[in-house]
Amino acid sequence: MARNPVSALHIGASAALALAVSAGCAAAQTATVANYHNTPDHAGLFTVPGLTSQNVANTTQDTAFNGTVSGVINAAPLYWRPTGAASGSVIVATENNIVTALDETTGLPVWSTTLGTPDPHSNTCGNINPVGVTSTPVIDAATGKLYVEAFVDNASGVGAHQLYALSLSTGAILPNWPVAVGAGVRALGGSFDETVQEQRGALALLKGEVYIPFAGYDGDCGDYHGVVAGVSITTPAVAHMFETADQRGGIWAPGGIITDGAGIFFATGNTEDTPSYAGGEAVIHLGPTLSIAGHKSADYFSPSNWQTLDDDDLDLGGVSPTLIDLPGATPSALMLAIGKDGDAYLLNRNQLGGIGTALQTVTVATNYVHSATARYTVGSAVYVAVNAHSPSCSGGNSQAGLLVLKVAGTTPAVNQAWCAALNGRGDPIVTTSDGTDNPIVWITGAEGDEELHAYDGVTGAALYTSPALPSTIAHFSTLLVANGKLFVTSQNRVVAYTLP
């Protein structure tokens, strides 16, 4: 199969897709959390019955939970609770290439599996050493399997990207796994250099394939590309691939690939020395086969100033796009993309439109934005929270903050709902008591004050601040809510909070 470079003339129309996970849907608090930010669209919305702005100040750290693991945690934790089980496990993967299931009550290991030697990564650029598991895995709850991508040192001292399937009951690596991802992409015509392709974006599972996004390392060394590999879980092998036409165009966002149940969406970063448009600075929609053959402008969007964004390293790909449904609006199937430069783009999800065709473009932040979003509904409006510094918020850190945008109206428009000063780079999530009521936005001051913060989702009023955690919270990771607890990752440990 030939590789699939992006071309402005060959990205295209597809039928409108029905959302598998609606904007207001949230998994029950005791259910398995199978994806980054809970649902396949990575909305970051969790349900905690009884939790309100009036009692959230009673949140307390669960000091009986001792979730220490081996290696730095950059991936977000997941939660596995088999049907009928009284309790579950917090699933944690580290840069030491170790995956551990922690008992949700004690934090002690239920099982722990080593995937191989992590790569020392001394031969290229980057700010992670060693490199093992950086991205958030994905759970197939129907089969009780965990899919996790690891960078593994081999006998020749060169790392290789491998996709593993583990039993969630025992942690055992399943037969016919791992899959050599880089070799599989090259076999399909991709120019995949293992040493410079970083895998930090969260995985997605759709229609029998695991989708894995790639970018480069901090410092932009080597000839990397924006790549998506689709690995079949029934016949373990790389079955499909996508690659940007020119070098770079990485898929950087920790939120990685999102899906609406029919196709996938992702955002790319800057390409380099590109005289004509080649797929960078874009929100891209692809079907399960990742093919762009016959596609037109309906399936991608790029700002009209894409070349300036390229030249100034102002990636659109630092934040995964957010799916929005706004009943009564025209159009009602929307998408919000936020660039590194602080510009937000409101898009028609079923007609992304090509270059410069956003429904609305508005500057919402003054700092470099590279974060994950969390989405929730209040009345007839959809709110989107992101770590970004709004010019209307003083104090905190000028390179961070909590910004909440509001998308509303029959002719939909984006406006600021509220903002809060924040010292740190954490990614937000949202809890509600039933999917919509009592929204509370949670965020950490990662690499800043190292505290856990909660805000009223409607007013922005500060509701709760924890004491500082004992070690640095990695800015790649985000929060997990499961079975009445909130879990925070801090270097090589997971800290638990009991929610009222």
Image: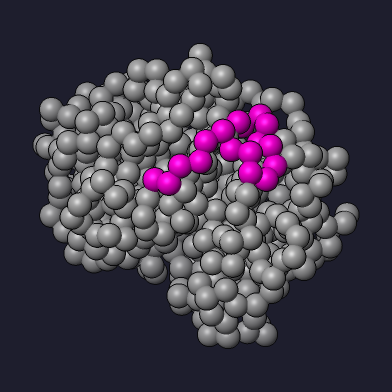
* Image position, residue 91 (x, y; %): 42, 50
Quadrant in which residue 160 is drawn: bottom right
Q: What colour scheme governs how the chains and residues are painted in the rendered image of this protein? A: one colour
Q: Is residue 118 visible?
A: no
Q: Is residue 8 left or right of residue 264?
A: right
* Image position, residue 330 (x, y; %): 56, 19
Taking the spot 17% from the left edge, 36% from the top edge, the residue there is: 461
Magenta-highlighted residues: 348-364
Foreground of the two, 76 or 97: 76
Q: Is residue 72 visible?
A: yes
- Quadrant, the C terminus: top left
Residue most toward the right? 1
Q: Is residue 301 left or right of residue 39?
A: right
Foreground of the two, 103 or 206: 206
Foreground of the two, 240 or 444: 444
- Quadrant, the N terminus: bottom right
Would residue 349 be counted in the magenta stretch? yes
